[in-house]
Image: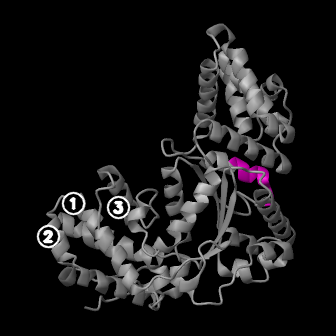
């Protein structure tokens, strides 16, 4: 296992996330057990998006199967190619899918790049104007004609977008003018309006000649504008993840049908080439893709996402519109645990050799089997809890106490409070009593 590709700070952040039972934001390539089969296909799709095409992909997996890990692993690969990325959680109240203006707003709030964390939206817009000025100067503009030359370039770059969303271009011009005039309040209002935020002061909107708030159809035009801005300031594309689309199954039927139709519309727009540089990824459970309350309710959508999963999973096509995440085996779980141990040992205050000797491969196997057994043998949902226990209950203690031996001093225990709903449903012990689950050695 090679850990030198991760800086000490990134290793610490990765371990801290696992200690909390969360999916890390960085270093996921080091933990990507079982995802090698997808690398060639997704890298080719990112390359396709980078050349000005658009890509749509759907990921399916049961709760706890690693959908969030997969999307963040893909996001890390995208950022390495200088893509901007945004992960949006679909929900009935916060981000209803049938209101694309809300989806766009969440996108700009979660927008990130390799060098800028969320929200990178204003940073990207400012970088775009700087790039325009540099291009204008390179074309022969002087200080006294720079603003006029930049405005001309802006109009040229946004010609296509202006036809679909003239307000986007108008607000960009107004934002730049407000900055040039030192009017911070107006600039703040217009950048918020460009990001889809509602209730922007009317005075700020009037200064740019725009009205009202962003609506469902206007959001598609704004997305085009954002892709143009990203491309011109050096980002070849945008990876947009719509996570947990299976929540659509639990909302009112009328809202569900509107959301499914909005998803169908968005997929069609991607395939029609309206969003050059966009890589759109959705995640959902098998029930969402195959069940009566999911995409099967809308025949055109079901047709677009239809994928054959009747063959052995090892023959799944990574280039297909849907990807099926592979289930974890004890062997894969053990490999993952060994990788985490090695990353932990690289920055341990204790002797790395002692950590490897105390938490050896045989112990990692035993712990993996014990955690899986406590969850009814469902290996697929075990990784989160297994890694949390490995880091916080075992490795941290070995690191801090020289005489700690997990075989002698540690018994795996689970309590209802620390489990997700899926893990609680799978657990075979009476967790209400917080019974000890012995580690079988």
Secondary structure at badge 3 equals helix
Residue at the spot 83% in from the left edge and 77% down from the top edge: 297
Decide if residue 57 is on the left or right side of residue 299.
Answer: left
| Residue 87 makes an appearance in the image | no
Decide which of tag 2 and tag 1 comes sooner along the chain. Answer: 1
Measuring from the top left, give residue 226's x and y in whole percent: 70, 42
Question: How many marks are shown on the rendered structure?
Answer: 3
The quadrant in which the N terminus is found is: bottom left
Decide if residue 272 is on the left or right side of residue 126.
Answer: right
Residue at the spot 74% in from the left edge and 74% down from the top edge: 305
Above or below, 133 against 98 in this view is above
Above or below, 129 against 327 in this view is above
Secondary structure at badge 2 equals helix
Decide which of tag 3 and tag 2 comes sooner along the chain. Answer: 3
Magenta-colored span: 98-105
Q: How far separated are the C-alphas under marks 2 and 1?
A: 10 Å
* Location of mark 2 (residue): 354
Decide if residue 298 is on the left or right side of residue 290.
Answer: right
**Label at residue 348:** 1
Q: How far separated are the C-alphas under marks 3 and 1?
A: 11 Å
* Location of mark 3 (residue): 15
Front position in the image: 315 or 165: 315
Res 405 quadrant in image: bottom left
Measuring from the top left, give residue 151's x and y in whole percent: 73, 22
Q: Looking at the magenta stretch, what is its main secondary structure?
A: helix
**Label at residue 10:** none
| Residue 140 makes an appearance in the image | yes
Residue at the spot 50% in from the left edge and 67% down from the top edge: 39
Measuring from the top left, give residue 332's x and y in whole percent: 40, 80
Decide which of tag 3 and tag 1 comes sooner along the chain. Answer: 3
Tell me the crowding category of disc 1: few under 14, some 14 to 19, or many 20 or more residues within 10 angstroms, Cα based. some
């Amino acid at each position: 296992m090679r850990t030198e590709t991760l800086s000490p700070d990134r290793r610490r952040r990765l371990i801290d996330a696992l200690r909390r039972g969360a999916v890390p934001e960085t270093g996921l390539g080091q933990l990507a057990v079982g995802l090698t089969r997808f690398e060639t296909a997704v890298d080719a799709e990112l390359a396709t998006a980078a050349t000005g095409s658009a890509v749509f992909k759907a990921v399916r997996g049961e709760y706890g199967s690693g959908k969030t890990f997969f999307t963040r692993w893909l996001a890390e690969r995208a950022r390495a190619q200088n893509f901007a990325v945004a992960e949006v959680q679909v929900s009935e109240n916060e981000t209803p899918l049938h209101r694309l203006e809300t989806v766009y707003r969440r996108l700009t709030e979660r927008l990130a790049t390799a060098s800028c964390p969320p929200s990178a939206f204003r940073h990207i817009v400012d970088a775009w104007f700087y790039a325009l000025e540099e291009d204008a100067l390179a074309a022969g503009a002087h200080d006294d004609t720079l603003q006029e030359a930049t405005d001309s370039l802006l109009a040229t770059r946004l010609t296509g977008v202006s036809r679909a969303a003239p307000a986007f271009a108008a607000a960009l011009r107004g934002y730049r003018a407000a900055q040039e005039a030192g009017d911070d309040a107006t600039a703040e209002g217009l950048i918020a309006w460009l990001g889809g935020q509602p209730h922007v002061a009317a005075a700020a909107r009037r200064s740019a000649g725009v009205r009202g708030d962003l609506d469902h159809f206007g959001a598609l035009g704004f997305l085009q504008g954002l892709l143009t801005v990203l491309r011109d300031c050096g980002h070849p594309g945008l990876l947009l993840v719509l996570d947990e689309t299976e929540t659509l199954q639990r909302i009112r039927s009328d809202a569900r049908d509107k959301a499914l139709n909005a998803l169908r519309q968005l997929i069609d727009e991607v395939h029609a080439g309206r969003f050059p540089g966009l890589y759109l990824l959705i995640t959902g459970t098998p029930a969402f893709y195959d069940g009566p309350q999911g995409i099967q309710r809308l025949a055109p959508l079901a047709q677009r996402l239809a994928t054959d999963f009747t063959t052995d999973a090892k023959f799944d096509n990574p280039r297909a519109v849907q990807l099926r995440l592979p289930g974890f085996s004890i062997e894969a779980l053990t490999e993952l645990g060994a990788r985490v141990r090695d990353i932990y040992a690289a920055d341990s205050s204790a002797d790395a050799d002692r950590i490897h000797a105390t938490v050896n491969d045989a112990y990692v196997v035993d712990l993996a089997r014990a955690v899986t057994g406590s969850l009814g043998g469902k290996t697929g949902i075990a990784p989160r809890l297994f890694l949390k226990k490995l880091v916080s209950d075992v490795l941290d203690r070995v690191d801090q106490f020289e005489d700690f031996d997990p075989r002698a001093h540690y018994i795996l225990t689970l309590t209802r409070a620390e489990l997700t709903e899926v893990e609680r449903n799978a657990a075979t012990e009476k967790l209400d009593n917080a019974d000890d689950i012995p580690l079988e050695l």
